Amino acid sequence: MDKKNISFLLSLYLAVFLTLLAAGFLFAFIINWEDWFFGIKLDGLPAGIYLFSKAVVAALLAYLLLKYGTKQFLLSIASLFFFLFASSCRFSPASGISGPDLAGQYSGSSLSS
């Protein structure tokens, strides 16, 4: 395989991954309007807008990657920043990881009986 074919296959893989990511965000948008934004839990309309916008951005990046194959490098860098943003929104700057505190959920007395 030459370099052009490998580049095309990698961009196709990235487009498929972005499409699956957009479908996941859209599924979360339809089922449950709840998401995290840098350690802040979003509910209701703000979460719906945020989930829908993430789905649209992921789908748009996948579409642009398939349509404009000549700009693969630029779109791949944009996709990388989108992945970094989408995954960093799960982490809270203060506590490290967001979400409920599961460490103190079970007490020793309830597990021993």
Image (cartoon, rainbow, N blue to C red):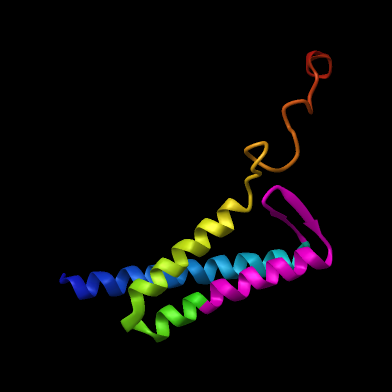
Q: Say whether residue 60 is left or right of residue 32.
A: left
Q: Say whether residue 31 is left or right of residue 92.
A: right
Q: Residue 43 lies in magenta, yes or no?
A: yes
Q: Is residue 58 above or below residue 41?
A: below
Quadrant housing the N terminus: bottom left
Segment tinted magenta in the rendering: 34-60
Q: Is residue 99 above or below residue 102?
A: below
Q: Is residue 69 above or below residue 113?
A: below
Residue 111 picture location, percent across and down: 78, 18
The one of 53 and 103 positioned closer to us in this rendering: 53
Residue 96 picture location, percent across and down: 62, 38
- At a point 35% along the width and 80% down the height, the residue shown is 71
Quadrant housing the C terminus: top right
- At a point 66% along the width and 70% down the height, the residue shown is 26
The one of 21 and 97 positioned closer to us in this rendering: 97
User: Hey, which quadrant is residue 53 in on the image?
Assistant: bottom right
- At a point 76% along the width and 63% down the height, the residue shown is 47
Question: Tag count in the figure?
Answer: 0
- At a point 79% along the width and 65% down the height, the residue shown is 46
User: Hey, which quadrant is residue 77 in on the image?
Assistant: bottom left
Most distant residue in the left direction: 2
Residue 93 picture location, percent across and down: 64, 43
